[in-house]
Image: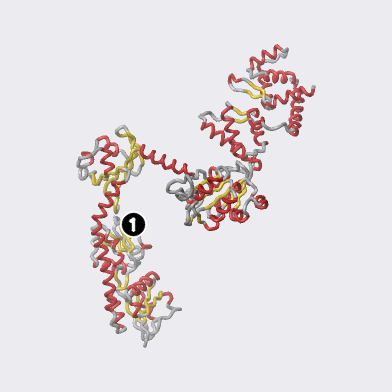
Amino acid sequence: MEKKTVTFVAKMDEFLQSVVSQCHELGISEDIHIEAIRVDQLPFRPITPGALVVLSTKSIVAQVESYLPQGSKLIVAKRMLPYHNLREMLEIPKGVKVLLVSDTPETAQENVELLRASGMDFEVYPYSPGSDYPPDVEIAVTPGEAEHVPVHIRKVVDIGFRIIDLSTLLAIYAHFNSDNFQKVTARAMQSLVYITKELNKEIQHAHLLSKYLEAIVNRIEDAVIAFDESEIVRFVNQKAVDSLNLHGIQVVGEKSVDCLPQDFYESIRQCEENEDVLVDWANKTYFFRKMHIVMEGSFLGSLILFRKAADIEKLEHDYRMRLYSKGLVAKYQFDDIYGESATFQQVIQIARKIARSNSTVLLLGETGTGKELLAQAIHNASPRRREPFVGVNFAAISESLLESELFGYEEGAFTGARKGGHIGWFELAHKGTIFLDEIGDASGAIQNRLLRVLQERQIMRVGGNKVIPTDIRVIAATNQDLQRMVQEGTFRADLYYRLNILPIHLPPLRKRREDIPWLVDHFVKKYSFDLRRPPFTLSNETMKALLDYDWPGNIRELENVVEYLAHIVDDEAYVCHLPFLREVSHDPLQAAVMDQECEGMIAEYAKRGFLEEMTAILHQLKQGGQGRYNLVEQLQEQGLQVSSQQLRYRLKLLQQDELIHVGKGRQGSQISSKGESFLAFLQSTK
């Protein structure tokens, strides 16, 4: 028996795909073998001998005829609009101008006639590239050829490619003398009946939907009022009725100027569109937003939403307090982390790349190097940034509580267990990040349970019997040498290798000293603002001392030092103010350097001829801060004839050598710790 084959030929793949899909939906492919060939494929993809060839348009007849097998019949398909995609066109308002866009004038005109025949009640203008059309048209309808729509058209309704008309399908069945066409018409009618039922359902549900939306708007926290273009109130929710005391007053259908309080009406008239503004009304502050209602380019009215500012502030406060109390917020971004040193810049670059993945991160570094800050920055740069960030410090929680806090517990799991049970930190971190700080302090029992969580991504509550899956990213941190602990047997090797997937080593502050000046300036501004005091400066000698110090407590210790200075200094911080210098023992090497520096200053002062005067000035200042006039008198009493101008010059030299601090105004001058060392060296050389 000869095989029944229909070969569809067209210029575009999209048309062929839609036709093949149509044949499957209507059951034609059950009776007839369907082929689809693009015109430009005919030279190397021959048409099956004996096949009925169906063309998408008569414009390609000449191109196809030379490839037609002997004895094969050729017909041009009649086309129809895809009725199952017409719903969006039904929403176009009556009488609106619509552009019907196709690739050629002929197909555009054909589609216009099909659209009119379908009963669409709007003005249709055919358009193909290069055609003229009315300038006020804003809507275009196209059967799968949206690329030809003019750029200024505001709305495009793409109904999809035209499908094969039932008359063409009948001709196909007649060609093969098949009596199965009744099945095709039945399935086509089934589709139309389905669409009709769907439209009827929408009509029946329209009233219910209106009531449903009204119920929703009545339950939102904002007060809502809707006006039409004539400022007639069309909707007001219960919150607005209560806020404006409109009980028992006819509002809907009335002019807003007549039914709303006059001062309230004037307030909303002054509001700009789509701007959030604070308005004082009735001795309270309200948060207002006014929006225009526009459909199909037409202005239909305005929507007013308002609420007491105090309610919004309370809501935000409660929300933040809940999050902060649970530790679910990561505050810091990469922009909050500063460092110019090459080693630290490399750390930040690695961390930015790592942030994009879900793999476990291990932060290694001394105390105070900023491990938690970096963990928060990684979270906020990751795809999980909108999810919780839960921080756990193993060194800050007792062993007896840690297990139940980490994994949660069921009701009655132990004496004192909360009724209803308790959600653990791993559950709270679901979809987000959990930060395990000081992981080196975890006990052996906790290490065992952590290993299971990292392997299985599942937890079981204390006293529970069911497994709870968790989707979390783990960032761990420690200032301990985990490799050494593994060798000593105090830390599980398998847990270490589960954690050490993406290690990041944070350098100590002593290895990034070039960052100290910026960090100092940052902390000075921070604590000056917190203490509501003017910012202060640091002398060159003080900054040098900060740069020379090894900072065992790293950035945290530096911040503590600056906070201390912010409390005790006035305009400028000197070396004598630095708390860590009072705690360190005398360094022989530093003493040798100081002695050498003192010898140089003595030689210079002696060369200029006023070593005695400089020594006398330092001795006087050692007894207490003094002004210039008082110093002049005391020097003259000692037989040193120094004028006020000469004293000013000598004080300037002493300040440059950091032997004294010159105060502003009436503060006078004070001897520095370096100045005291200078006097001590002079005494030792006598």
Q: Is residue 30 above or below residue 87?
A: below
Instruction: Please tell me which residue lies in front, 577 or 515.
Output: 577
Q: Is residue 562 above or below residue 215?
A: above
Residue at 27% over, 58% down = 92
Residue hosting label 1: 153
Q: Where is residue 543 in the image (x, y as percent from the top left)?
A: 64, 33
Q: Which quarter of the rendering shows the N terminus?
A: bottom left
Residue type at mark 1? Ile
Callout 1: 10 Å neighbours few (<14), some, many (20+)? some
Residue at 45% over, 46% down = 418
Q: Where is residue 511 in the image (x, y as percent from the top left)?
A: 66, 43
Q: Position of residue 401 (x, y in %)?
A: 53, 45
Determine whether, in the image, residue 89 is placed left or right of residue 640. Answer: left
Q: Position of residue 238 (x, y in %)?
A: 26, 43
Q: Which quarter of the rendering shows the C terminus?
A: top right
Residue 593 visible, this orientation: yes
Mark count: 1
Instruction: Please tell me which residue lies in front, 646 or 251.
Output: 251
Determine whether, in the image, residue 522 is placed left or right of residue 226. Answer: right
Quadrant in which residue 166 is drawn: bottom left
Residue lying at the far right in this picture: please name it: 686
Residue lying at the far front in this picture: please name it: 415
